[in-house]
Amino acid sequence: MKRIQPSYSSSRFERQLPLIGPEGQKKLENSTILIAGVGGLGSPAATYLALAGVGELIIVDDDRIQESNLNRQFLHAAASVGLQKVYSAEATLGSLAPDTSVVAYPGRIDEISADRLVADADVVIDALDNYESRFVLHEAAWNAEVPFIHGAVEGFSGQMTSIIPKKGPCLSCLIPAVPPSGKVPVIGATAGVIGSMQAMEAIKYLTGIGTMISGRLFLWDGQAGRSEFLHIGSRKNCPFCSKGRE
Amino acid sequence: MKILIRCYARFRDAFGEEQALELPEGATILDAVRTLAGTGPDAELLIDNVGNIRSYVMIMHHDVRVSPMEAESVSLSDGDMIILFPPVSGG
Ligand SMILES: [Zn+2]
């Protein structure tokens, strides 16, 4: 939880206060969210969370902007190709929501950085593009008991779920194995849908409103216009979370 | 008997959105997935070279997840639907 109180005028959040109340707004203002990845998913997730009045975003990404990112990564302007993504994201978020403080970390998620980054966060948004980093960050979040909001996209399809540590299944329970993948094609709007859902989950968790997408994996195929929920309990022999569980 | 298989994401690209399969009585989920794999050019997306379902294939049957290893022990009934989904990874 952080200390700086935003100084917005009273009408800034007029259209959402009836939904979350002044207490809910206060909770968002006092929250810190870690956004891991400021690409296709991180663009909508970070933008909607900053616009909602979240007090602090820690944004992490070690990539520089490439021209091929621009079909979906709207935190970055065309003129910013070649810059570190976190600094471009910091500038865009600063202009959209000047009272949200943004901490930019242009490094990799590894065992050491993950623990440190998660320690300051109330919620983690998994907007990463590979499972290796995801599982490292997930372990850090699980151990620190910080909710981990997972999203991933490919083509016209996406998936998302909220992992609430020690209260439900972990990421390994939900996704025991992953197919090999390289650079995947993606329509920008696919990342828009899933990244926006991740922002929604974070807002629900922080304000205590609604029902989390937890213990179930949301599967969505935009091309077919279909979605499912895969209901999944904790795996009995989960190599990650079954230790110490009966 | 007739069953339906609905595919998501990369599996939909390879095998279509939904396929009705005609299977013998007593067929299992493993039989159904092997049959589906034979209908497209990308069988190896679903099954390995000894005919086992790949470990990453998420299978849903009657709202319950079935692991690829259990697929041989789950018998299907006429009218059943199976959903197949590959975890996606992009961000
Ligand atoms: Zn687990």
Image (tube, rainbow, N blue to C red):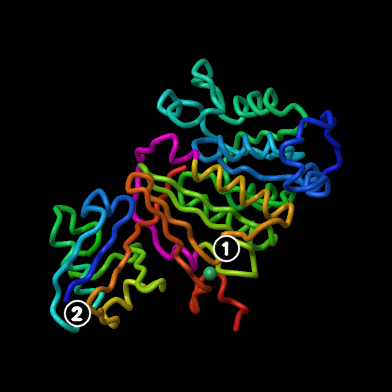
Position of the C terminus of chain A by quadrant: bottom right
Q: Is residue A64 toward the left or the right of residue A2 in the image?
A: left
| Residue B88 x %, y % | 40, 51
Badge 2 amino acid: Ala
- The answer to whether mark 1 is within 8 Å of ligand 1 is no
| Quarter residue A33 falls in | top right
Q: Residue at x 40, y 27 (%)?
A: A68
Q: Residue at x 57, y 63 (%)?
A: A214
Badge 1 amino acid: Ser
* Nearest to the observer: residue A177 or residue A3: A3
| Residue A140 x %, y % | 63, 57
Q: Is residue A186 on the magenta stretch?
A: yes
Q: Residue at x 43, y 46 (%)?
A: A153
Q: Is residue A113 above or below residue B87?
A: above
* Callout 1 secondary element: loop
Q: Which residues are magenta?
A: A172-192
| Residue A145 x %, y % | 69, 62
Q: Is residue A51 toward the left or the right of residue B54 in the image?
A: right
The numbered dot on residue A214 is 1
Chain assignment, label 2: B
**Spatial separation of the CA atoms under disc 2 and disc 1:** 33 Å
Q: Is residue B89 toward the left or the right of residue A115 in the image?
A: left
Q: Is residue A19 above or below residue A106?
A: below
The numbered dot on residue B27 is 2
Q: Residue at x 56, y 76 (%)?
A: A242
Instruction: Characterize the magenta stretch by its predominant secondary structure.
Output: loop
